[in-house]
């Protein structure tokens, strides 16, 4: 059985070619470790920036009522004043806004956005094209 004491194990010097390869590998490890450290710090800085920046953008005009709640014993009673001759083809609801899609008597396609919180039409969109 081999004896693995420190006295018996002596580091033999590497030949010059292997020593050159070892030095190159150490240099590559240091360079790649430095690049990874810089990139890791860049990611951390971007995360901190996203968490601390101010979201002070302009608020949309139609977002006047941020919380829209209807009591169960008092349902809403609203009227959307659509133009005469308008034929409703489809409706859709998203939050407190209702999209009313249809056609005018002349065949012109239109879409109206009715805000339930405000009780009025907030957008009148004319659809053109084929």
Image (spheres, helix red, strand yellow):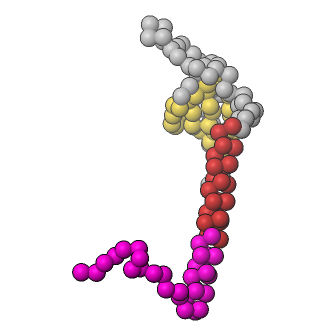
- Tell me where residue 4 appears, x and y as whole percent: 34, 76
Name the one closer to the observer, 43 or 34: 34
Quadrant position of residue 68: top right
Q: Quadrant of the C terminus?
A: bottom right
Q: Which residues are magenta?
A: 1-30
State yes or no: residue 127 in magenta.
Answer: no
- Observer-nearest residue: 80 or 120? 120
Q: Give the quadrant of the N terminus.
A: bottom left
From the viewer's side, name the closer residue of 107 and 71. Answer: 71
Note whether 25 is above or below 97 in the view shown: below
Q: Residue 84 at what x, y percent from top left?
A: 64, 27
Viewer can see residue 111:
yes
The answer to which quarter of the image holds residue 57 is top right
> Residue 7 location in percent, x, y?
41, 76
Q: Nearer the viewer, residue 127 or 68?
A: 68
- Residue in view at x 54 percent, y 28 percent: 95
> Which residue is located at x 28 percent, y 81 percent?
2
- Residue 80 seen in the current view: no
Based on the picture, tell me whether residue 26 belongs to the magenta stretch: yes
Where residue 128 sits: x, y (%)?
67, 48
Outermost residue, top side: 73
Left or right of 7 on screen, residue 35: right
Relative height, residue 64 to residue 47 (above, below):
above
């Amino acid at each position: 059985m081999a004896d693995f004491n420190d006295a018996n194990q002596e580091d033999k010097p590497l030949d010059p070619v292997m020593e050159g390869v070892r030095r190159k590998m150490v240099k590559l490890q240091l360079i790649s470790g430095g690049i990874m450290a810089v990139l890791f710090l860049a990611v951390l800085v971007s995360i901190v920036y996203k968490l601390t920046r101010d979201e002070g953008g302009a608020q949309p005009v139609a977002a006047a009522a941020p919380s829209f709640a209807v009591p169960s014993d008092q349902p809403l009673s609203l009227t959307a004043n659509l133009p005469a001759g308008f034929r409703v083809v489809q409706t859709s609801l998203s939050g407190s806004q209702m999209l009313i899609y249809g056609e005018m008597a002349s065949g012109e396609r239109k879409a109206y956005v009715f805000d339930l919180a405000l009780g009025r039409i907030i957008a009148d969109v004319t659809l053109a094209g084929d």
